[in-house]
Amino acid sequence: MCLSCAEVGTPPNVMFINCEPLCPVLNTECTLNLCIKDFCPKRISVTWTVDGEPVDSSCVFNTPPSLNVNGLYAMYSFLKLHPTQTKRNQCYRCKVEHSNKNSESNNVLCVPPLEVGGGQHRLLSV
C-alpha cells in the first residue's frame, strides 16, 4: 500500500534567508526573504518576529503555496524593514510551522552594527 504525501506529510525545506540589498542603507527600506519548498500538504504557517515581538502584518507578504512538478509545494515570505540607528542589533526571526510534527524551523537574521563612513551609513554584513 502506498501512502500519499497528504496522509504522511513532507516537512518543508527552508532554503535561505537573506536581505536585499545585501548591504542595506540606513533609513532605506530593505527586504528579508525566505524560501520554503518541498512540503506537503500545503497548509503552512510563517510568522515573523523582531526581538521576540510580532512584526506589523503590513510589513509581511507571503506568496500562496504553489504546486511544483515534483508534487510538493513551495512558497516565499518577505519582510520589509527600515534600518535605523535605534533598530540596530535587532534580531528578526522567521518561524515556519507545518502539519508534519517534525517540521518546525526557526531562521534568524540579526541586524548588525551600523558602519559609518564616506558620508553614508550602511549595515555591516554578518
Image (spheres, rainbow, N blue to C red):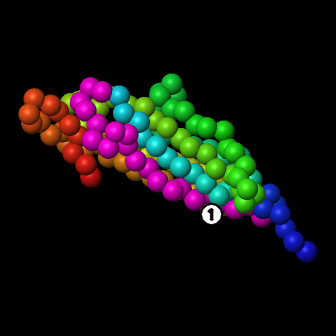
Quadrant in which residue 70 is drawn:
bottom right
Residue 14: give x, y in percent of width and height: 53, 56
In the orientation shown, which residue stands out farthest toward the right? 1
Q: Can residue 100 be seen in this view?
A: no
Residue displayed at 8% across by 34% down: 118
In the structure shown, which secondary structural element does the residue marked by tag 1 occupy? Answer: loop
95 lies left or right of 93 = right
13 inside magenta stretch: yes
100 lies left or right of 85 = right
In the orientation shown, which residue stands out farthest toward the bottom? 1
Question: Is 7 located above or below residue 68 in the figure?
Answer: below
For disc 1, the marked residue is 102
65 or 111: nearer the viewer: 65
Q: In which quarter of the image is the N terminus?
A: bottom right
Residue displayed at 58% across by 59% down: 13
Residue displayed at 56% across by 43% down: 76
Quadrant in which residue 38 is drawn:
bottom right
Residue 74: give x, y in percent of width and height: 64, 50
107 or 101: nearer the viewer: 107
- In this picture, which residue range is highlighted in magenta? 8-28
Q: How many numbered marks have been drawn onto this rendered protein structure?
A: 1
Dot 1 amino acid type: Asn
Residue displayed at 15% across by 40% down: 115
68 inside magenta stretch: no
Q: Can residue 70 be seen in this view?
A: yes
Residue 114: give x, y in percent of width and height: 18, 39
